[in-house]
Structures are given as C-alpha cells and as structure tokens.
C-alpha cells in the first residue's frame, strides 16, 4: 500500500505548480491530445464533485473543441467513472493508507479515471494510462503528486487478483454496493422494496449504456422518408413493439448528423415518457394542463395528440426552462400550447381542465443509467422532501380539475415512497377522486398491482417510471 498520507487538500505540495510551463513540452501531438482529453475528464469530474454541476450539461458545453475520438473518450470515461465510482473508490482505499477523503478532488479523479480505463477500456494499453496520469500530475501539480499517482496505479496492476478476492470477502450488502457500484443505503432500500434478485438486476441495468430512442412526431413527419433515410445511411433502428411511435436508434452519433431533430420530425425521448400521455389520452378540443412541462417531451406528445385543437396550458417554474420548452414546442409544430412561467403549486388560471398531467419532480432513481451522477447526489432526505412536494402538487391539481376529469400522476423514480405512498395519501385526503383501472390501456407487462403502471430498466428496456390515472368523481 502507498503511504503518502500527508498528501491531502491542506498540503501545499499538492497545489498546482506555478513554475510548470504551459508551453511546448516536446510531447508528440497525438500524445498531447490524449493528455488534454484526460485533463478535461478530470476537470469535468471535479466540477461534478465540488460544484454540484450536472454531467450531461457539462459534456454538452465543454468538449466541442476536441476531435471526434477525444469527445468519445471523454464522454465514455466521465460517464464510466460516475457509474462505477463506489467500486473505484473502494479499490483506491485498499491501495492508499492515507485518508482518502482528504485527497484533493483532482487527484481522486485522476486515479478514478485511470483505474476505470485499466478495468474497462481494453484498447488503451496500461503503460499509456500510467504515463498520461503521471504526466498530468506532474504538469498540474508537482513530482511528489506524480509519484503518489504512479505508485497507486502500479500497485493496482500488481494486486488486481488480490483485490478481486478481497471484494468477495466483504459483508454481503457491502459487496453488492462495491460490485454493482451503488450507494450502500440505496442498495439496502431497494432490497427492502424489491428483494435481492430484482435489486441486483436493477443495478446491473443502471450500469449499462442506455439504448436511446426517438418519438415520431406525426404533426410533421414523413414516415416513409424517415425510414428510407435511415436505411440509406445504414443507421440501425428498431420500432418498439408496444409503442410504434417510438424507435430505438443504435448509432446515435450518425443519427444526429441528419436533420430530423432540427425539422421537428422526432424528439429524443424514452418510451417510458409516452406512457403517461397514453393514459391521459388528450383529444382535440379539450382543455389540457401540463403542470411541470419542461423540457417538453411529454408536452410535445400532448400537442400532437390534440392535433393543435383545443386549449393546452404548459407550465414551467424556471424562466430558462420555460424558454427551452417554448423552443421545443415550436420546433415540433405545436401551435395550441400556451407556455406560462409559473409555479404549479399556484396554477395561474381559474378555469377547470378536462385533463391534467402531473409529471412530478422526483429523485430520478429510474434514470440512473442516463443521469449517472444522481445516485451520488441524492440522499434519504431528498426522498422525503420530494414526497411532500409531490403531494402538494397533486392537491394543487385537484382544485383545477373538472368533475369527471382525468389527472395522471407520473414520475421517473422507482421509489415506493414517491409513488404508491403519495397516491395512497392523496386518495385518503381527497375522497372525491378514484383511481382508474387500466386493464385495456397497456400491455399487461407494464401493469403493476393496484392499477399502477411501472417500468424497470431490466424488465422493459427503458427508464424506470411510475404512472397512475386518477378521476374526479364528485365536487
């Protein structure tokens, strides 16, 4: 084990060395490019750790300057480190006898990203990973830091088999947390709710790269031209068997080069997001409210179903997201939507609606294979806070719904406290509402007990989600 326990956040020897030149190092251009990409990986991971920044937003903004290969490497390693962070940190703790928590974030993320590459990326030889990690440490900090990084990584290469045996000897729950790289408390909670077998399958699915899909927009699309163009460009795709308006695209980098998104023919959208709209069943001429509408995937689908006829009010609390919502609806050709910047707890209308969609804010535990940083940001307290907010939003919706009207409640989390428990409490408080039976609305594989719809990544090959349809039967 490497004993450099004094190399921590308070140690000035770990700070960037102002004497290190940023000019010509004599390094070949291709190696320089790899080092620059690795430096960007560390920078993004550190910003996620220390500033609570969101990974997907950082990747959108920060990597345009790199070539296609480097962009792919940065995206792969950043997402990979965040998927496997618990396991990577456990490995580093076995190799470093100092206080792991006191290591400065840059050094942690250099080690994490290096070990991730050594484990998961066969195309990069170990000597290249080590050389780049050491060079970055030397350039960004000093020789002492470079020596530490070098020692830990060499120890890892020597002790891989030993570490595998050590992992097998952990207590069962801790072994699950390390092996599948999820927070211990979350593993424990899911086992209580879903059992061990389902939890393991769920964790495995969360660590897989997501298969991306698009929704066809029937307001604008020429379907024949769409599929013909995919075939001409040899872009593999698969139409969803249960939701034919959704199409899986297996080469998204090539798909993005086409102009379908710009034309508004399609939206990048998971099939699970279509289920609440199918339950809502918005129709031309109705008055429909989407309470939490941004960024606009479900809202665009609602507008399509309404065929631009009727009143469609789409709310979004945050001005920037409201502008994004309006831009998306315009792109999709939705003309009957009225986008209002407003808090859904205080619906800015005295009208009663025929149908209301509440796709509620939630912890997002159903989308962990896409939002790879969420499992490290969320806490038990977040679940309780979301539960309370979700109830308040349902109560707000109840006041704006006509008698006989439909209210669909949906989330992108799998947690019972945010789903069944919210609905149960709401129905107890509002006896003028009932929960609809959904027998004929969806294939049986999506229906859960108590007439709820649930999807799981490992069962349905889409995001985890929950939805119920409530109906107001009296005033």
Image: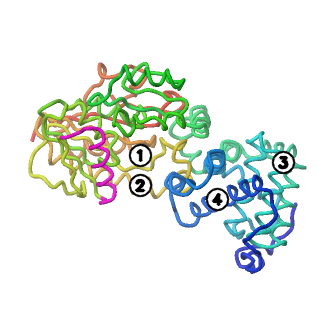
Q: Is residue 328 magenta?
A: yes
Seen in the picture, residue 384 relative to 336 is either above or below; the reply is below
Cα–Cα gap, marks 2 and 4: 36 Å
Question: Which mark sits nearer the N-terminus, 1 or 4?
Answer: 4
- Residues shaded magenta: 318-335
Question: Which mark sits nearer the N-terminus, 2 or 4?
Answer: 4
Mark toward the viewer: 1 or 4: 4
| Residue at the disc numbered 2 | 384
| Residue at the disc numbered 1 | 417
Q: Residues within 10 Å of mark 3 (few under 14, many from 20)?
A: some
Task: Give the secondary structure at mark 4.
Answer: helix
Give the x, y percent position of residue 224: 37, 19
In the rendered structure, find residue 126 and report the number of the disc placed on it: 3
Cα–Cα gap, marks 2 and 1: 8 Å
Q: Is residue 134 magenta?
A: no
Q: Residues within 10 Å of mark 4 (few under 14, many from 20)?
A: some
Instruction: Identify the main secondary structure in magenta.
Output: helix
Whether residue 379 is visible here, answered yes or no, is no
Task: Give the secondary structure at mark 1.
Answer: helix
Residue extending farthest to the right is 158
Question: Which mark sits nearer the N-terminus, 3 or 4?
Answer: 4
Cα–Cα gap, marks 3 and 2: 45 Å
Cα–Cα gap, marks 3 and 4: 20 Å
Task: Give the secondary structure at mark 2.
Answer: helix
Give the x, y percent position of residue 78: 63, 51
Q: Residues within 10 Å of mark 2 (few under 14, many from 20)?
A: some
Q: Nearer the viewer, residue 103 or 94?
A: 103
Residue at left 84%, top 43%?
A: 165
Cα–Cα gap, marks 1 and 4: 38 Å
| Residue at the disc numbered 4 | 40
Give the x, y percent position of residue 234: 54, 23
């Amino acid at each position: 084990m490497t004993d450099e326990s004094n190399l921590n956040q308070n140690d000035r020897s770990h700070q960037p060395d102002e004497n290190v030149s940023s000019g010509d190092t004599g390094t070949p251009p291709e190696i320089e490019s790899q080092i620059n990409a690795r430096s960007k990986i560390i920078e993004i991971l550190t910003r996620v750790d220390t500033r609570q920044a969101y990974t997907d937003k950082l990747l959108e903004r920060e990597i345009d300057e790199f070539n296609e290969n480097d962009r792919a490497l940065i995206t792969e390693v950043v997402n990979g480190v965040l998927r496997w962070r618990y396991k990577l940190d456990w490995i580093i703790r076995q190799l470093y006898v100092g206080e792991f928590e006191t290591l400065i974030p840059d050094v942690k993320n250099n080690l994490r990203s290096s070990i991730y590459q050594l484990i998961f990326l066969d195309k990069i030889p170990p000597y290249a990973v080590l050389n780049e990690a050491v060079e970055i440490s030397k350039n960004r900090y000093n020789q002492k830091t470079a020596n530490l990084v070098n020692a830990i990584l060499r120890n890892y290469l020597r002790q891989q088999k030993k570490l595998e045996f050590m992992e097998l000897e952990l207590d069962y729950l801790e072994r699950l947390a390390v092996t599948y790289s999820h927070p211990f408390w979350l593993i424990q909670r899911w086992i209580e709710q879903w059992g061990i077998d389902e939890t393991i399958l769920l964790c495995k699915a969360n660590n897989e790269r997501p298969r991306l899909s698009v929704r066809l927009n029937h307001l604008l699309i020429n379907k024949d031209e769409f599929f013909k163009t995919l075939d001409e460009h040899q872009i593999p795709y698969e139409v969803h068997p249960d939701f034919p308006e959704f199409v899986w695209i297996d080469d998204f980098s090539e798909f993005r080069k086409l102009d379908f998104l710009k034309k508004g023919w399609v939206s990048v959208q998971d099939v699970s997001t279509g289920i609440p709209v199918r339950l809502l069943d918005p129709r031309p001429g109705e008055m429909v409210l989407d309470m939490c509408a941004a960024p606009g995937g479900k809202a665009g689908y609602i507008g399509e179903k309404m065929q631009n006829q009727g009143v469609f009010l789409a709310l979004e609390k945050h001005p920037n997201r409201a502008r994004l919502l309006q831009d998306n609806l315009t792109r999709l050709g939705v003309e009957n939507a009225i986008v209002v910047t407003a808090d859904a707890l205080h619906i800015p209308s005295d009208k009663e609606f025929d149908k209301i969609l509440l796709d509620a804010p939630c912890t997002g535990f159903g989308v962990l294979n896409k939002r790879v940083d969420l499992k490290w940001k969320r806490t038990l307290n977040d679940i309780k806070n979301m539960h309370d907010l979700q109830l308040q939003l349902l109560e707000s919706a109840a006041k704006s719904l006509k008698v006989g009207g439909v209210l669909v409640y949906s989330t992108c989390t799998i947690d019972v406290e945010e789903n069944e428990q919210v609905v149960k409490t709401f129905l107890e408080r509002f006896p003028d509402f009932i929960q609809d039976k959904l027998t004929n609305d969806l294939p049986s594989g999506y229906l859960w007990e108590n007439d709820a719809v649930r999807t799981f990544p490992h069962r349905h090959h889409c995001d985890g989600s929950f939805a119920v349809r409530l109906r107001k039967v009296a005033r």
